[in-house]
Image (cartoon, rainbow, N blue to C red):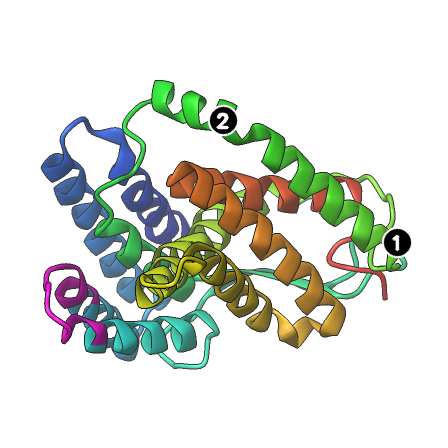
Amino acid sequence: MGLLLTYGFLVMAICFNWILPKIDSKKIAALTFFIISVFYGIIYNYIELYGVIIIIFMFYFAYFYYNRDNKIKYIYLFLFIILALITSLHILPGFNNYNVVKNIKLTSDSKYYSLYLNFDKAAAGFVILFFQQDLLKSIKDFLKSLKKIYIYIILSVLILITISSLFGYIKFEPKVPYFILSFIVSNLFFTCLAEELFFRKIIQENIKIMFINNRYNVIIGIICSALSFGAVHLAGGIKYFIFAFIAGIFYSIIYEKTKNIEMAIIAHFLLNLIHIFLFTYPALS
């Protein structure tokens, strides 16, 4: 029950940033559900005091970054980036993320795989999401953006799967893991959403601003965003870095062409979903 209450309210908090028609109502509902999620996380020991303090500081830094117009806002941005990164990489204490599966092989020739419901990473993503004012407002807007960008999404999946196969990183191994529902929730709401918000909305956008007087600022933003996305995946090896960098290029282009973070999230999630269903996951051993 504690698992359902803690993570269920967290997912609801994320979703309510889109569901209600008015911005103010969305934010009040989203924040309320997030606070309830944190409350149950404390009760059921998924979150400790340190975790609560970290979340408060992330909100504090993000609030002043998004609500100040002078240069001092970038000090708050820097502090938020550092705190969000080390939190998302599970370096700081305060979170006892639920372990769905640990050190299992999905196929006989795959590497060992573990799945956690990472409240810390999701919390960092929620904080960024909470301050966004340009989210898609309707299914009609969503479909309009998808129509504009679906070719890029298809290309990103085909190219990344092809390259990964040619480099011997994966091979065709269709399956339906028994924990697939947990994977979908975790990957969509806690991984893809958090990573795309951070690397596109925080890194890419601010790099573009930093090089605003350079006519190539958009390209620089895309490359820096993709490089930083690849860098956080270096623990998986140099091949994983390269694949993540290429994926980051596609996600950054998709975001840049639509200005909708939802499209980058969808592209990221679709690739991961196809990967786990149809190919070696996470990679060949």
Residue 166 is tagged as 1
Q: Is residue 283 above or below residue 90?
A: above
| Residue 267 placement (x, y as % from top left) | 56, 41
- Nearest the camera: 9 or 167? 167
Q: Is residue 211 above or below residue 20?
A: below
- Nearest the camera: 238 or 275? 238
Task: Verify whether residue 79 appears in magenta.
Answer: no
Question: Which residue does the numbered mark 2 point to in the structure image?
Answer: 148
- Nearest the camera: 55 or 212? 212
- Taking 264 as reference, is 108 left or right? right
- Image quarter where the C terminus lies is bottom right
| Residue 134 placement (x, y as % from top left) | 26, 40
- Taking 201 as reference, is 254 left or right? right
- Residue that appears at 80% across and 54% down: 164
Task: Verify whether residue 71 appears in magenta.
Answer: yes
The picture quadrant where one finds residue 51 is: bottom left
Residue 183 is tagged as none
The picture quadrant where one finds residue 100 is: bottom right
| Residue 179 placement (x, y as % from top left) | 63, 46
Amino acid on which disc 1 is placed: Leu
Q: Secondary structure at mark 2?
A: helix
Query: Badge 2, how many Cα within 10 Å: few under 14, some, many 20+?
Result: few
Residue stretch in magenta? 62-74
Q: Secondary structure at mark 1?
A: helix
Disc 2 vs disc 1: which is toward the camera?
A: 2
